[in-house]
């Protein structure tokens, strides 16, 4: 584990609401190794996106990390000043979002926004930055890169905007790229293009990728290792093949069984009954118990710990 | 499945919807968006007809036309021997008793100031089918049917989760005992575990109430799961339509093939290089000449740039619009048409 780039320990995040504090990430522990692609899977309300925002230090104003440690290489991210965090973002950790339109500034050209990062972090001249910017756009497969530099975000299609975001994120050679649902808003043929791009990127550079998604298809395409989150906790962690061949937690199993398969049609889909619990009103004991097909009274009494069943496969369930 | 073969419940012929997006007053620039551009297909009683395609292909416009929510520019939509395209508002209102819709986002399609009881009861009240105690009884039966509880009747939409809200939308669509329901991206916004619940519910209701579905979606796995037949749209045109297994196992149109190949498979052992199709969907206001797919098609020939391929029944019940359809390698059923490149 000395190969780890990012180390998150017992991370807890809460939000201030009218009814007091609501905790949406409840003790998440994981690490991202150098050069690996880690997928964080979960449905809405699992806390997967909040976890990534907390890592980037960009939680909304009413949110805060109130416990736990985040280490990136030898830096303790919880103790960084705003200025230090800003330097880290972009240069060492970069992030791409689901909807690039909200992340790109609509009033500046693509070229301006690409150059800005390079001038800021690398003290490049405008000409150098322009050249490097065009190069970056070409790397992510944008045709007519020079022309695109002069365009505004709204003049590009969704797939193009996502490529621009990736180009921008990669322009400073980050060590870690956090991709939050990077293909969810895209059409399926464009999604295939972006996934291929991310896969090639990993092969060419040694960038670690942390991909956050609800889509097990995307996970299967990209990840080396997977963390499954439910109600603000990690419920299972395993290498990719291990997870798909031998899922342990009933939630992971249910999730896999409930996706319609394109090559294997069944009459009725397996479905996990009920819905994700409200963070303000969490069940005591196991949080998945109300929806669990195998749980019993014991599960309501103890909150199961995350246990390793082998060197790298962990589960949070006392019944399996 | 209670599909009654040959019993056509809806038929669409040469359906077109063009939007005039012309701008300017003095210097007028004429722009016509051909959202739907000449569709022909039938819907059989009791089946689920899936319509898939990427953004801008015209699938949702097709759904709106079939519901009479948009006026067709050209063509006909026959529903039980009446043409929806030529109906007056009054006639449409009557037809909608048999023709209902479920939308993608139940939160924006449900009035936030109405309780579930009012929402589900409204169609019955509007059509004068029930009132008072009878209305309440019917609403509670509808809620039970979609898996909601009677005590939830007095709640408002915001008090429900996404999946439950979709159930309210379904109950509302079922209230008038319709014959056909258009499901426009009905499960697209839901989490996978909830999506499975709703897909199962829709299937169960179809059996119990003898419903016909037109299931419009971009998510191919869900469409394959629920549909009996599937049509693939591209730039306002139907490029292929066939029985679902036939379509998934032996696609004839290169676009269908590329679309199916792009779907990420949730199994890391099947990880592979995708057969990427280059470029993006052209704008429907300026479609390419000839076959609309030719600029992106890996098999395009000179003919494809000039002639629009005819949409025809190339094999029994398998329609395709392509000059050079792909050969089914297992059976070699199209020996006269060679796979090029």
Image: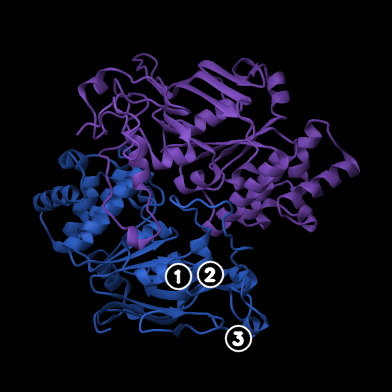
Q: Residue at x 80, y 48 (%)?
A: B141
Residue named by callout 2: A251
Tell me the quarter of the image containing the N terminus of chain B.
top right
Of the pair B150 and B119, the residue shown nearer to us:
B150
Residue A170 in the image, given as x and y percentages of width and height: 22, 59
Q: Where residue B184 is drawn, which disc sits there?
A: none
Q: Is residue A241 left or right of residue A305?
A: left
Residue depicted at x 29% and y 51%: A194
Chain ID, mark 2: A
| Residue sitting nearer the eye, A241 or A22 | A241
The reply to whether discs 2 and 1 touch (Cβ–Cβ < 8 Å) is yes
Chain A tint as drawn: blue
Label 2 neighbour load within 10 Å: few <14, some 14-19, many 20+? many
Residue at screen point 55% across, 48% down = B187
Q: Secondary structure at mark 3?
A: loop
Residues flagged by tags 1 and 3 on a common chain: yes
Tell me where residue B278 sits by quadrant.
top left
Earlier along the polypeptide chain: callout 1 or callout 3? 1
Looking at the picture, does residue A306 appear above or below residue A42?
below
Q: Quadrant of the C terminus of chain B?
A: top left
Using a 10 Å C-alpha cutoff, classify the residue at mark 3 as few (fewer than 14 neighbours), some (14 to 19) or many (20 or more).
few
Note whether B272 is above or below B78 in the view shown: below
Q: Which residue is mark 3?
A: A302
Badge 1, how many Cα within 10 Å: few under 14, some, many 20+? many
Residue on which disc 1 sits: A228
Q: Chain of mark 1?
A: A
Answer whether labels 2 and 3 touch (C-beta < 8 Å). no
Question: Alpha carbon of mark 2 to alpha carbon of mark 1: how far?
Answer: 9 Å
x 35%, y 50%: residue? A100
Q: Residue furthest right?
A: B133
């Amino acid at each position: 584990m000395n190969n780890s780039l990012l180390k998150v320990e017992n991370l807890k995040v809460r939000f201030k609401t009218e009814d007091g504090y609501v905790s949406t990430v409840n003790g998440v522990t994981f690490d991202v190794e150098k050069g690996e692609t880690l997928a964080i899977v979960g449905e809405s309300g699992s806390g997967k996106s909040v976890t990534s925002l907390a890592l980037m230090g960009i939680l909304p104003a009413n949110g805060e990390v109130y416990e736990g440690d985040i280490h990136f290489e030898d830096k303790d991210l919880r103790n960084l000043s705003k200025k230090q965090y800003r330097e880290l973002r972009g240069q060492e950790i970069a992030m791409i979002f689901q909807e690039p339109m909200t992340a790109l500034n609509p009033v500046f050209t693509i070229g301006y926004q690409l150059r800005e990062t390079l001038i800021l972090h690398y003290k490049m001249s405008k000409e150098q930055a322009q050249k490097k910017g065009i190069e970056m756009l070409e790397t992510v497969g944008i045709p007519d890169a020079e022309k695109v530099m002069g365009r505004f975000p709204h003049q590009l299609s969704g797939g193009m905007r996502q490529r621009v975001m990736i180009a921008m994120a990669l322009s400073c050679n980050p060590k870690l790229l956090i991709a939050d649902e990077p293909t969810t808003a895209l059409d399926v043929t464009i999604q295939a293009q972006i996934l291929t791009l991310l896969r090639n990127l990993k092969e060419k550079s040694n960038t670690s990728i942390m991909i956050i998604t609800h889509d097990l298809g995307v996970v299967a395409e990209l990840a080396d290792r997977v963390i499954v989150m439910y109600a603000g906790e990690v419920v299972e962690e395993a290498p990719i093949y291990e997870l798909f061949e031998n899922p342990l937690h009933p939630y992971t199993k249910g999730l896999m069984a409930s996706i319609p398969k394109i090559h294997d049609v069944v009459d009725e889909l397996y479905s996990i009954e009920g819905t994700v619990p409200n963070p303000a009103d969490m069940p005591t004991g196991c949080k998945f118990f109300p929806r669990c097909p195998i749980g019993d009274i014991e599960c309501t009494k103890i909150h199961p710990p995350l246990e390793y069943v082998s060197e790298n496969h962990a589960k949070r369930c006392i019944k399996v | 499945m209670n599909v009654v073969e040959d019993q056509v419940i809806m038929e669409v012929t040469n359906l077109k919807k063009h939007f005039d997006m012309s701008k300017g007053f003095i210097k007028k620039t004429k722009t016509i968006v051909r959202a739907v551009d000449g569709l022909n297909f039938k819907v059989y009683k009791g089946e689920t007809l899936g319509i898939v395609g990427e953004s801008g292909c015209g699938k949702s416009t097709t759904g709106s036309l079939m519901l009479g929510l948009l006026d067709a520019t050209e063509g006909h939509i026959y529903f039980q021997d009446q043409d929806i395209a030529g109906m007056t508002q009054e006639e449409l209102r009557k037809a909608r008793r048999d023709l209902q819709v479920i939308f993608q986002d139940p939160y924006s399609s449900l009035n936030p100031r109405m309780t579930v009881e009012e929402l589900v009861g409204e169609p019955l009240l509007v059509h004068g089918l029930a009132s008072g105690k009878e209305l309440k009884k019917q609403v509670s039966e509808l809620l039970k049917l979609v898996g909601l509880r009677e005590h939830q009747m007095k709640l408002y939409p915001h008090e429900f989760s996404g999946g439950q809200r979709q159930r309210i939308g379904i109950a509302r669509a079922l209230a008038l005992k319709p014959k056909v329901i258009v499901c426009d991206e009905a499960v697209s916004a839901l989490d996978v575990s909830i999506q499975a619940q709703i897909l199962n519910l829709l299937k169960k209701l179809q059996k119990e109430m003898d419903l016909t579905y037109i299931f419009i979606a971009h998510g191919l796995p869900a469409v394959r799961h629920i549909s009996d037949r599937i049509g693939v749209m591209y730039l306002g045109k139907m490029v292929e339509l066939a029985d679902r297994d036939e379509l998934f196992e032996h696609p004839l149109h290169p676009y269908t093939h590329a679309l199916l190949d792009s779907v990420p498979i949730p199994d890391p052992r099947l990880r592979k290089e995708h057969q990427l199709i280059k470029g993006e969907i052209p704008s429907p206001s300026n479609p390419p000449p000839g076959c609309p797919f030719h600029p992106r098609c890996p098999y395009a020939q000179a003919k494809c740039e000039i002639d629009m391929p005819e949409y025809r029944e190339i094999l029994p019940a398998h329609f395709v619009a392509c000059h050079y359809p792909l050969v089914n390698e297992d059976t070699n059923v199209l020996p006269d048409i060679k796979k090029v490149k």
